[in-house]
Amino acid sequence: MNERTRIILNGIAASPGLAVGKVCFWNDPESIPRYTIKPDQVKIELARLDEALITARKQLDILKTRVEKEVGEKEAAIFTSHGLLLDDPAFYARVEKLLINDNINLEAAVEDAIEDIVRVFKKISDPYLRERADDYRDVGRRVLENLLSYQRQCTMDEGEPIILVARELMPSDTVQFHRQRIGAFVTERGGVSSHAAILARSLRLPAVVSVPHALSRVGAGVLVLVDGNQGRMIINPSPGEIEAARKDHDIRERAAERVRVSAKAMTRDQVEVALSANLTRENEADEARRVGAQGVGLLRTEFLFMDRGEFLDEEKQYRAYRHVVETMAPHTVTIRTLDLGEDKQFAFENPVQNAACILGWRSLRLSLSDEAVFLAQLRAILRAAAHGPVRILLPMVAGVEDIRRVRVLLEKAQNDLETAGETFGRQVPVGAMIETPAAAVLPEVILREADFLSVGTNDLVQYVLVADRVSERMQPYYRSTSPAIIALLAKLAQAAQAAGKDISICGEIAGDPMYLPLLLGLGYRNLSVAPVLIPDLAAAVGECNLAQAESLAQRCLSLSTADEVEACLREGMAKSALAV
Ligand code: PEP
Ligand code: MG
């Protein structure tokens, strides 16, 4: 393979669209990546080393000037000697040798070179020289940080979109991507229902997940094409492919400008379907409004915290929720209380999240474990409810006792606000997410205490099928078309109808046109999806016919495997397209 060989790496399509750009690695700062490189990558790695050294020199100059000014010249001298270490030809030669002879990646080579040098210094009897070992470590750490920080890597190519290649992306990383020059991302790990994938769709970033060895197959700074439709990354794409990707990008940008004028989606036989929005940032409310969302079906509040990078107090939460409520009024905003857990963690100091647990130490249970934090969120929601219709949604409800505990706290929050003389909404319905098997098998019991239901299929599928939604290995088992899931969806719709209460679906299947006839046929009339999906979903509703959807749903309920259900849904979609 030479530097310009075109190579295709396959993975799973996680977010649609095509994007071209240069690769930057997104590394976990806690661990230094270590992998084998091809001989023709040595030149690229050395160019990265040069960049990292230039950046480190600049950083040291800035530090030296600051310390000189604020502390003194003597103290600042340390940075001059650190600068000299950066220029040490022995260090450069050692790294180069490791790259050429051992074929290891640059980060690993820098780490090894520093350790080799430190070992030599530690053996020296002169105490002054021995202490230089620590300076080497310090300088080495700075160079490594420069290599690992994708923002610093990416200053290499100002103006080019960045294609992030990562082992894995945390939701707290991904939620901040809208602030950066990121055109797409590719990960070695993760499934389509992982939060990174959900966020990619809501940010309209093409993404491919579960690409084996992506980090070692591509070098930083190499031009790649990410094909989020077919689930692949093309290294060194052809000029024709680059042109096609640029066109796709322009089309998507124009589509994003689309305004949906009609207020409600309607099937061919005039059945109304309410499409509301799943939001991860308060500013997305403007987009939700523009595309004609009939409210917010799911405000994932934990992402507002992650986006700001801090734990929001009652006042900050209130302002964020109020913005969404005022933007969406007179439509209803459904605010979900914090839903943190193993797969959704805050990257900053916070009072609620601590001990991890293999299963279940998350969501509402975390909130209930710290009443002060939970009460602050409830008060913020109640205060926002003074500005427009609001509903509270509780994640991962397992039984009515969960709802009862929340109602007690809600009353306390109201009393607190009353005493403080705050204005707040008094009629705030409380709903339950159906995402545990316990809630899904007895919806009629949950409905005795919940004012409405929202089906979180992303989690329901993982808990019913025992298949981790974020694990690439579990993807063959994580099947939303499983007959067990279809049967539960049917049961839930019937239970809500019998109780005369609202039910909606806010899991990712709600935005996938393949599932639309099935969901309508099972009786669902409220779907909540990322705003970007609403225009196409509204069009897909217009192509459906309820009578046909009902017979399709009945057929699906009689099938035995996820593959059979999927084939049935694909056939249904093809027929509905032909009928228009
Ligand atoms: C779900 O589980 O389906 C859901 C909508 O919530 P989240 O994806 O945030 O877990
Ligand atoms: Mg969930």
Image: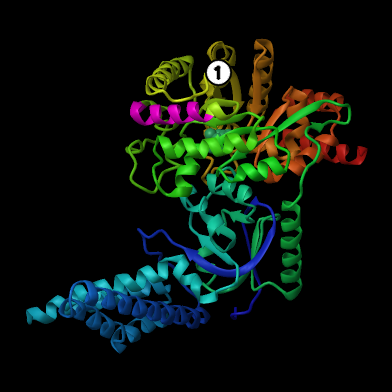
Q: Nearer the viewer, residue 22 or 408?
A: 408
Q: Residue 379 appears in which quarter of the rendering? A: top left
In the image: residue 202, left or right of residue 129: right
Is the C-beta of the residue carrying label 1 under 8 Å from the nearest atom of ligand 1?
no
Which quadrant: the N terminus?
A: bottom right
Residue that lies at the very extreme toward the front in this rendered image: 421
Work out whether 506 lies above or below 33. above
Main secondary structure type of the part rendered in magenta: helix
Q: What is the total number of numbered labels drawn onto the structure image?
A: 1
Q: Residue at x 75, y 70 (%)?
A: 243
Q: Position of residue 466 (x, y in %)?
A: 52, 33
Q: Dot 1: within a 10 Å radius of its alpha carbon, few (fewer than 14), some, or many (20 or more) residues?
A: few
In the picture of the structure, the residue carrying the numbered disc 1 is: 427
Task: Check the image and report above or below for 283 versus 428.
Answer: below
- Amino acid at pointer 1: Gln
The x, y position of residue 213, in whole percent, is 52, 62
Residue at image location 54% in from the left, 15% down from the top: 446
The image shows residue 445, relative to residue 376, as above or below, that is above
**Which one is in front, 279 or 525?**
279
The residues colored magenta run 369-384
- Ligand 1 visible in quadrant: top right
Q: Residue at x 65, y 11 (%)?
A: 499
Residue 10 visible, this angle: yes
Q: Is residue 451 left or right of residue 549?
A: left
Please give left or right for residue 396 compared with residue 183 in the image: left
x then y, percent, for residue 339: 47, 34
Residue ID at (71%, 40%)? 512
On the image, which quarter does residue 19 sit in?
bottom right
Determine the secondary structure under disc 1.
Answer: loop
Is 382 colored magenta in this rendering? Answer: yes
